[in-house]
């Protein structure tokens, strides 16, 4: 394993231990609201601090883009930038719904190089390095080879905080519930993307995400032989926040089904 990926794994496991301990006593949890339906707990902040400390020990000069601190945009000019979601699926965590993850990616000159998504409930560690494949607990994973959208199990995320695109989203949702085998909304985008990489889901789409929700999961899908894009079919999803992913066949059909529903504000 590449030393940078190894450090990210160490950081993710430390954060996972902290989150697992906190999950034993959710009654004690103090929940803050950042904006409507956007929650943060001291666990999110402590997990982020642990991750940053672990990374900084080894790579003090690397830039950091983390949800609860740091800058808010990916920096293509930084030589190395870590993109971190210390607890993806905070709403699930607060409710004791065991579907959340730690997501850590490293971009090198703006290109995703390493990725970790760690599910501390199931002790499932998804990792990838550019050009070296994707793994679940050190076993190679590949996207599914289900060829047809009408047989596909899709993941998605509902709009719940910003409602600008809710009508376009619901029109797509309506079409997908008719056209595919099933749609799931588990509640942690990084893990949804990791599930596409592992072939548990055949495709995924969501709008309005932040770079830390997607960076690691996107590299996992690419390294597992899948495709990801923004709504224009280009690679700008970390900037636009809108992502479509899947095995190559389902990805193409899903993107084609989504595109006619785009509004002027939802082009890419
Ligand atoms: C959220 C989760 C959720 C997605 C949201 C994200 P958070 O992240 O990934 O699945 O639908 O858009 O913001 O806030 O729990 O880290
Ligand atoms: Ca998140
Ligand atoms: Ca988060």
Image: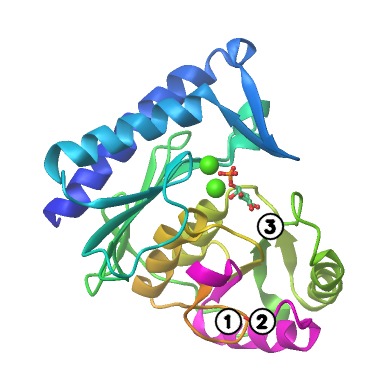
Badge number at residue 218? none
Look at mark 2 in the image and give the residue it sits on: 254
Answer with left or right where residue 44 lies relative to residue 170: left
- At which x and y percent is residue 90? 59, 36
The span from disc 2 to disc 3 (Cα, nearest Å) is: 15 Å
Answer with left or right where residue 22 lies relative to residue 49: right
Scheme by which the image is coloured: rainbow
- Residues drawn in magenta: 238-267
The span from disc 3 to disc 1 (Cα, nearest Å) is: 16 Å
Q: Are marks 2 and 1 in contact (CB under 8 Å)?
A: yes
Q: Upstream in the sequence, badge 3 or badge 1?
A: 3
Question: Per the image, is 244 magenta?
Answer: yes
How many C-alpha atoms fall within 10 Å of the one at disc 2: few (<14), some, or many (≥20)? many
- At which x and y percent is residue 202? 58, 71
Question: Per the image, is 70 magenta?
Answer: no
The residue at 68%/89% (across/down) is 256
Q: 55 or 254: nearer the eye?
A: 55
If the image is split into quadrants, where does the C terminus sit? bottom right
The residue at 58%/48% (across/down) is 188
Q: Is residue 126 above or below residue 124?
A: below
Q: Mark 3 falls on what kind of element?
A: loop
Asked if the beta carbon under badge 3 is closer than 8 A to the nearest atom of ligand 1, the reply is yes
Q: Quadrant of residue 95?
A: top right
Q: 153 or 87: nearer the eye?
A: 87
Q: Are marks 3 and 1 in contact (CB under 8 Å)?
A: no
- At which x and y percent is residue 267? 68, 83
| For discs 3 and 1, the disc positioned in front in the rendered view | 3
Look at mark 3 in the image and give the residue it sits on: 157
């Amino acid at each position: 394993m590449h030393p940078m990926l190894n450090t990210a794994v160490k950081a993710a496991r430390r954060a996972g231990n902290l989150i697992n301990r906190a999950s034993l006593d959710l009654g004690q949890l103090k929940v803050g609201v950042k904006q409507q339906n956007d929650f943060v707990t001291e666990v999110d902040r402590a997990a982020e601090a642990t991750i940053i400390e672990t990374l900084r020990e080894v790579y003090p000069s690397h830039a950091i883009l983390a949800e609860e601190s740091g800058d808010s945009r990916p920096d293509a000019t930084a030589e190395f930038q870590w993109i971190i979601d210390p607890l993806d699926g905070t709403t699930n965590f607060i409710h004791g719904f065991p579907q959340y993850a730690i997501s850590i990616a490293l971009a090198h000159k703006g290109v995703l190089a390493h990725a970790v998504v760690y599910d501390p409930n199931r002790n499932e560690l998804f990792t990838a390095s550019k050009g070296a494949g994707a793994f679940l607990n050190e076993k190679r994973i590949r996207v599914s080879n289900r060829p047809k959208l009408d047989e596909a199990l899709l993941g998605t995320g509902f709009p719940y905080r910003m409602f600008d695109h809710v009508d376009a989203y619901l029109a797509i949702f309506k079409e997908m519930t008719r056209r595919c085998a099933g749609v799931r909304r588990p509640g942690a985008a990084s893990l949804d993307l990791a599930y596409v990489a592992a072939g548990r889901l055949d495709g995924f789409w969501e709008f309005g995400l932040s770079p830390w929700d997607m960076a690691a999961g996107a590299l996992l899908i690419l390294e597992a032989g899948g495709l990801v894009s923004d709504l224009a079919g280009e690679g700008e999803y970390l900037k636009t926040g809108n992502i479509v992913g899947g095995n190559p066949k389902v990805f193409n059909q899903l993107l084609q089904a989504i595109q006619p529903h785009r509004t002027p504000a939802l082009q890419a």
